[in-house]
Image (spheres, helix red, strand yellow):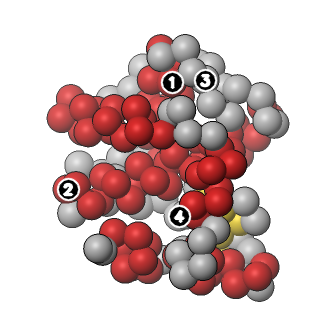
Amino acid sequence: MLYNASDIAQYIITKCCILSKPISNLKLQKMLYFIWVDYYKKTSSPLFLDDICAWQLGPVVPDVYYDYCSYGGRSICNIYETSIRENDASIIDEFINDYVDVPASVLVNKTHKPGTAWDIIFNHGLGNRDTIPFSLIKEKECIG
């Protein structure tokens, strides 16, 4: 089932708050990206189809970024009612548990490795804020 990235973001934020490990907007963006990748690897289906763009600090879902940009670098701890199906929630929970203790800087560095989808589109700043095609994400992040 396809979701909106905002729904997935709210689920991630809620889960991290329940775990007493609230996250920043920067970390939320990286978790959204890697959870999208991991979910696709596991299910062969996209989790959401909102644009993922190549920003300076890595992949960003702009609509979600702007929803939480007022937090700056502070932790976001809100509890939301979400409508994520139970089987998808259990898959997403696995990935949240994988990433919740990883510092945002480590996730940023992971997206910045040469040859990643972000690196190809960002292209030393020439593609700043350009959309990263899902086909490229699949090719560079989901195969192998």
Residue type of the residue flagged with mark 4: Asp
Q: Quadrant of residue 138?
A: bottom left
Identify whether 6 is placed above or below 136.
Answer: above
Secondary structure at numbered mark 4? loop
The dot on residue 22 is 3
Whole-angstrom CA distance, mark 4 to mark 3, is 24 Å
Residue type of the residue flagged with mark 3: Pro
Whole-angstrom CA distance, mark 4 to mark 2, is 20 Å
Q: Is residue 63 visible?
A: no
Whole-angstrom CA distance, mark 1 to mark 3, is 5 Å
Query: Label 2: which residue?
Result: 43
Query: Label 1: which residue?
Result: 16
Disc 3 crowd rating (10 Å Cα; few below 14, some 14-19, many 20+) is many
Is tag 1's residue or tag 2's residue first in the polypeptide sequence? Answer: 1
| CB-based contact (under 8 Å), mark 1 and mark 3 | yes
Residue type of the residue flagged with mark 2: Thr
Query: Label 4: which residue?
Result: 51
Identify whether 38 is placed above or below 17.
Answer: below
Secondary structure at numbered mark 3? loop
Q: Nearer the viewer, residue 101 or 60?
A: 101
Secondary structure at numbered mark 1? helix
The residue sitting at 78% across, 79% down in the picture is 125
Disc 4 crowd rating (10 Å Cα; few below 14, some 14-19, many 20+) is some
